[in-house]
Amino acid sequence: MQTPFHTVGLVGKYDHPEMYESVCKLAEFLQGRGHTVMLASQTAERLKIEGCPHRNLSDLAQESDVVVVLGGDGTMLSIARELAPYGVPLIGINQGRLGFLTDITVEDMLDSVAEVLSGQYVAEERILLNGQVRRSGERVYEATAFNDVVLGKGASGRLIDIEIAINSEFVYSQRADGLVVTSPTGTTAYALSAGGPIVHPTLEAVALVPVCPHTLSARPIVVSSHSRIELHLTYADDARVHFDGQLHFDLQSGDHIWITRANRPITLLHPHSYSYYSTLRQKLHWGKKL
């Protein structure tokens, strides 16, 4: 078979009740097409799937031509952060709720994956964000985000004070519940609920969206993704920084958070019929009676 995607890695959300059937069905289908199929070790072990070689995520990324992620957007966020350094493209099968990132339905899974692997696909490069927490001039924490880096209040529920600079130029100070620094991909997530703009995922941009700001004139702004965004937590009873809502670090007054574009993007592969605007209409229920 003539295809650039000979070896296919499969990663499934192993705590999903219907995942065993989906992973096995897709693996059998791909093997029948002549592909070499490998499973992520946790997926194979938790779901007790046999018949395919197992690999940890780093080896899976290095040995696969493409990786198919079965789960929801949360699963894709987690796997994308892990695999981004290796440059392997990803295909998303939605077995979650929303499905902005995992856009192929389980019902269309076999036909859509076959279409992509046959070379009929739309490829999108999505940027990721890198965040560093610096305390007294030293780096104390670092993580990557696919959607967003969120500086927010902690358990006390009290407002926090933030100073924002871009490329070392002061922009504004704010008292708020928090601030969302989002990639274009993340503009349809938490940032959208906070009143931020929807940014097309292929744009080289980052949006800064205040969360419940005390100053009502505070508005979201969009800047170049090649900027360094510098957040200074000037005061907080307690505060945290969150990465995709999956990783977090407790902050202290005086901490700085530096956010930059990550070195490697993620490439998502969609069926040839994929349309971002159609996805927005479907997921956000545009044009429907309320």
Image (cartoon, helix red, strand yellow):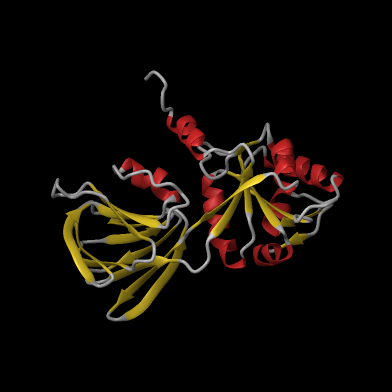
Q: Is residue 18 above or below residue 265?
A: above
The residue at 39%/18% (across/down) is: 289
Image-based side of 236 in relation to 78, left or right? left
Image-based side of 13 in relation to 168, left or right? right
- Residue 232 rendering spot, x and y as whole percentages: 24, 68
- Residue 72 rendering spot, x and y as whole percentages: 56, 43
Tell which of 141 and 3 is nearer to you.
Answer: 3
Q: Is residue 33 above or below residue 161?
A: above
- Residue 240 rendering spot, x and y as whole percentages: 32, 60
Q: How many marks?
A: 0
The residue at 37%/43% (across/down) is: 198
| Res 189 seen here | no
Quarter where residue 103 is shown: top right
Image-based side of 153 in relation to 277, left or right? left
Tell which of 230 and 25 is nearer to you.
Answer: 230
- Residue 214 rendering spot, x and y as whole percentages: 14, 49
